[in-house]
Image (spheres, rainbow, N blue to C red):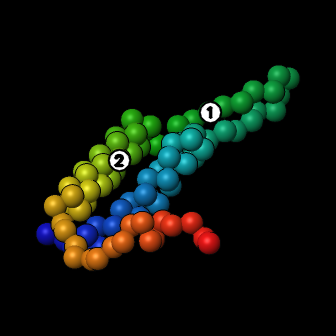
Amino acid sequence: MRTINEVLVLMKVVRERLNGLKDLRKQVSITESYLYSAQDKKVVEPQYDVKLVDKKITELETWLFKADAAIKQSNAKTEINIETDTDKLLAPLT
């Protein structure tokens, strides 16, 4: 069990990791090299298994979804005691 605040902080870290993996999937998953000969040729070699990177991205996205849903479900059940005059709060400036 974790507190909501702990999960929110963890969600931020997971999102940063997720963004890093998405960048990896786009940019660093291949190596480009050029062969200079009579005809210029470009050789592209995969450095990571894109399927494994994509699988990890999917795992992180699934966890983020579950964490977000759990927080929202908790918030839906939690009541707070605060007196509010909505009309006064939203009244126009006079």
Taking the spot 47% from the left edge, 50% from the top edge, the residue there is 21
Determine whether, in the image, residue 83 is placed left or right of residue 13.
Answer: left
Establish if 20 lies above or below 92.
Answer: above
Look at mark 1 in the image and give the residue it sits on.
44
Q: Position of residue 27 (x, y in %)?
A: 60, 44
Q: Residue 61 shows which numbered tag?
A: 2
Q: Nearer the viewer, residue 87 or 48?
A: 87
Number of numbered discs on residues: 2
User: Element at badge 1?
Assistant: strand
The residue positioned 30% from the left and 49% from the top of the image is 65
Type of amino acid under label 1 = Val
Residue at 52 percent of width and 37 percent of height: 46
Q: Position of residue 73 (x, y in %)?
A: 20, 55
| Camera-side residue of 93 and 22 | 93
Residue 44, position as x, y percentages in the image? 62, 33
Q: Quadrant of residue 40?
A: top right
Q: Residue furthest front?
A: 94
